[in-house]
Image (spheres, rainbow, N blue to C red):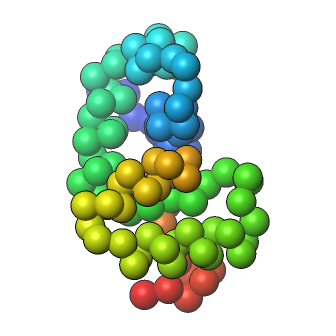
């Protein structure tokens, strides 16, 4: 079984969640991985319930506002909120440490 780095997985999932015009199958084919692998990563990501504020389209202040808003939402609204912002679950710890959250 082939293993993939966290950054590779995050890159693929960012493409899936970023509203790409490509299907999951097209993204998988381009990356040379099975489509089932992407669905497994998505499933695992949802179980972990961590958030990642990746990308450079937000400055630190905006990221802080987003993370504060995230923690104030009801559990059922958190996933859709993050997807609307272009984020997904995975690397929350660094951001929380940066802003001393928790």
In this rendering, the answer to whether 25 lies above or below 20 is above
Left or right position of 90 against 21 = left
Q: How many marks?
A: 0
Q: Residue 8 location in percent, x, y?
A: 53, 37
Where in the figure is residue 86, as x and y percent of width and height?
Answer: 55, 47
Which quadrant: the N terminus? top left
Would you identify the image quadrant in which residue 100 lies? Answer: bottom right
What residue is at 75 percent from the left and 66 percent from the top? 59
Q: Is residue 38 above or below residue 44?
A: above
Is 74 situated above or below 53?
A: below
Q: Is residue 47 left or right of residue 42?
A: left
Q: Report the quarter where the C terminus lies.
A: bottom left
Residue drawn where x is 44% and y is 17% of the image: 23
Relative depth, front residue between 71 and 90: 71
Q: Nearer the viewer, residue 83 or 5?
A: 83
User: Does the rendering let one see residue 93?
Assistant: no
Pinpoint residue 74: horizontal percent, then vertical percent.
Answer: 29, 71
Query: Residue 47: percent from the left, percent from the top?
Result: 24, 54
User: Is residue 11 in sight in this rendering?
Assistant: yes
Q: Is residue 91 or residue 72 the one in the foreground?
A: 72
Left or right: where 59 falls relative to 91: right
Q: Which residue occupies 33% across, 38% down?
A: 41
């Amino acid at each position: 079984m082939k293993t993939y780095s966290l950054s590779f997985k995050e890159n693929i999932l960012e493409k899936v969640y970023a509203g790409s015009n490509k299907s999951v199958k097209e993204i998988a084919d381009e990356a040379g991985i099975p489509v089932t692998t992407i669905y497994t990563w998505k499933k695992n990501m949802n179980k972990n319930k961590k958030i990642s504020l990746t990308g450079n389209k937000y400055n630190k202040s905006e990221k802080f506002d987003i993370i504060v808003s995230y923690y104030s939402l009801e559990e059922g609204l958190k996933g859709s909120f993050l997807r609307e912002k272009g984020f997904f679950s995975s690397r929350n710890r660094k951001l929380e440490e940066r802003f001393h959250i928790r």
